[in-house]
Image: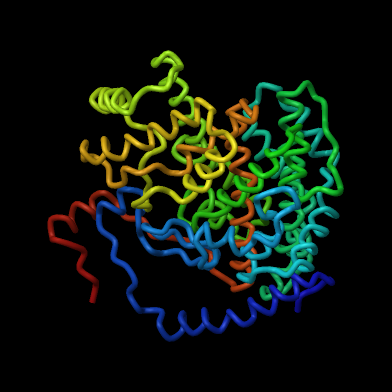
Amino acid sequence: MATGKSALKTKLFEKMEAWKPRIQKLNKEFGNVIIDQVNIGQAIGGARDVRCLVTDISYLDPIEGIRFRGKTIPETFEALKPFTVPGCEMPTVESFFYFLLTGDIPTKEQADEVYKEWKSREALPQYVMDVMRALPRDTHPMTMFSAGVLAMQRDSIYAKRYAEGMKKTDYWDPTYEDAMNLLAKLPTLAAYIYRIKYKGDVIIPSDPKLDWGGNFAHMLGQVKPYDDVARMYFILHSDHESGNVSAHTTHLVASALSDVYYAYSAGLNGLAGPLHGLANQEVLGWIQSVMKKMGNKLPTKEEMKDFLWTTLKSGQVVPGYGHAVLRKTDPRFVAQNDFARKHLPDDLTFQYVNTIYEVAPGVLTEHGKTKNPWPNVDAHSGCIQWHYGVREWDFYTVLFGIGRALGVMANTIWDRGLGYAIERPKSVTTAMLEEWAAAGGRKPKA
């Protein structure tokens, strides 16, 4: 049974118990039903589009984009409208996490419970601060962030209870506690890193009256409407089904029954890669280089078109365009674009983002070497951060990491609740592939 007095934890336990028979029936009665085939290109190309993971937290539709618990991004924001802080536009992250974890839109009392739970757990242990201060100040902020998460493993409730001995059916319980502790502390940890690294070591204490996103903005040293930027950014970057590197890495490590600190530290290390979370930083750098080449004056569409063609003909790419799954403009781009049109319409960097958006899809389509000529979330993320003064762009991936934790923690709790197995795909050799290629495919053994 669920332990503790949390109503959220009790509801979650009931939902997982009701869900288990569905998984057990599928596995027992329909385990041999084929849902996908794998070709040589997928085996060599990073298992692209191979359906072999299960998650009910989010699903990435090629046309509609990400769906959180079945809802599109606009539907999610609309459903969570009642949980907007007075004077703000974006719903609280607390209400969103309740929805992500349970699949239900919370009541005010249920959202408030998450707020109170996180507030009671947000204090950063002194030893974590000591670890941060022991690192050279020129250490990359993602290294510091990952190290901070890993350092907190000493307080893992799951690791302690596992060592003492507990039933498999109880694994989810301390995993929930660890996840809630970790989520509560992430904004505090990230803001601490930001202030000691970039702001003269002047720490801004937490404000007990502010929600998760608003408090992060406060601890960073930001003012309105950056609190809404933080809420929006964390929600949009929370989850993107389980196949991307950060989500998959966290799932993989946790499948070995490593606690969430081990698992998410590993996920952050994947997020730090230039083909994943680092991309928003690279896009902003590219846009600024374009602005410099054009004399920091807004070009006409024709001038931008000529520039993009020159870029492509030189063998370079247009950063921020294309996506492994999506085949339309990323709804996360659209959400940020709507916010920017309202709050920073005259910002030159934003105007460049828009001009590129108006021209690039047509150029890329004509170029014919991309499956998706539309912008992804990274084409916009850095622009808004830069406008509000968060210009330390090597910190942008940390912002991504704070948001991504929401999705992977929800997934990990459910994975433990449903008793999913350790992940262990099978490898083949190049010689095997060559043999099967010559034979027109692998022949099943009798």
Residue at the image position 77 percent from the left and 64 percent from the top: 161
Residue at the image position 66 percent from the left and 43 percent from the top: 230
Residue 123 x/y as whole percent: 84, 46
Q: Is residue 306 above or below residue 54?
A: above
Q: Using the image as rendered, state which of residue 200 and residue 343 is in the foreground.
A: 343
Residue 58 x/y as whole percent: 52, 62
Q: Is residue 19 above or below residue 330?
A: below
Q: Quadrant of residue 141?
A: top right
**Quadrant of the rendering where the N terminus is positioned:** bottom right
Q: Using the image as rendered, state which of residue 324 and residue 81 is in the foreground.
A: 81
In the rendered view, does 173 fall on the left or right side of 352? right
Q: Quadrant of residue 321?
A: top left
Scheme of colours in the image:
rainbow
In the rendered view, does 7 fall on the left or right side of 323? right
In the rendered view, does 91 fall on the left or right side of 58? right
Residue at the image position 41 percent from the left and 21 percent from the top: 290
